[in-house]
Amino acid sequence: MIILGIDPGLANLGWAVISPGPTAIAFGAFRTNPKQRLGQRFIGLSNDLMSIIKQRRPDIVAIEHAMGMQFTQSAQEFFQAVGVVLLTCEHAGLMVAHHKVGTWKKGVTGNGAAKKPEIQAAMQKAFGLKSLPTPDHAADALGIALHHLMLMERAA
């Protein structure tokens, strides 16, 4: 089972590919240029994501789902990125599992309000990485994917 974890964002979209073990296969973040037209940023994210999907062939995608987020510029960009991810995954024929931010953070750190450094440290330990996973958006994506893996293993 290969899981693609996504931490959505328009400026920075974190991604991570993991397998049971857990093993971190690959992780990183896509960045978009805020000077580009919005549609061009969407196309760039979709193309980058499709490249990872074709290269790593995940079985499922796990994405952060923000409930109760106040409508701000940041929230608008978050939901725009979610739309790009959902459309890209639909084109690729992939199922998408949504995980609430507080739930996945609690599941992988024990703290539903964990901040970026705490998540990075937890992911370093969980995956046996030599250093903290960077950028921090990639660490979040690792956490989202790991939480999904943990839920699957409990259900089995």
Image: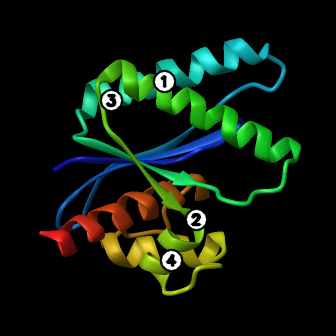
Instruction: Determine crowd level at label 2: few under 14, some 14-19, many 20+ residues with C-alpha closer than 10 A.
Output: many
The reply to whether dot 1 and dot 3 touch (C-beta < 8 Å) is no
The residue to which callout 3 is attached is: 53
| Residue 152 versus residue 46 in the image, above or below | below
Left or right of 54? Residue 65 is right
Please tell me whether mark 2 sits on a helix, a strand or a loop: helix
Q: Amino acid at mark 1?
A: Leu
Of the two numbered discs 2 and 3 on the same chain, state the one appearing first in sequence: 3
As measured in the structure, the alpha-carbon distance from the residue carrying label 2 to the one carrying label 4 is: 17 Å
How far from the left and from the top, in percent, is residue 92? Answer: 32, 22
Q: Nearer the viewer, residue 97 or 140?
A: 97
The CA distance from mark 2 to mark 1 is 21 Å
Whichever of callouts 1 and 3 sits on the residue coming sooner in the sequence is 3
Q: Which residue is mark 1?
A: 87
Number of on-image labels: 4
**2 or 4: mark nearer the eye:** 2
Pair 2/3: label in front: 2
Q: Which residue is outermost to the bottom?
A: 110
Q: Amino acid at mark 2?
A: Val
Name the amino acid, label 4. Answer: Ala
Q: Callout 3 environment at 10 Å: few (<14), some (14 to 19), or many (20+)?
A: many
SS class, disc 3: helix
Q: Image point 78% across, 39% down: which residue?
A: 76
Q: Earlier in the sequence, mark 1 or mark 4?
A: 1
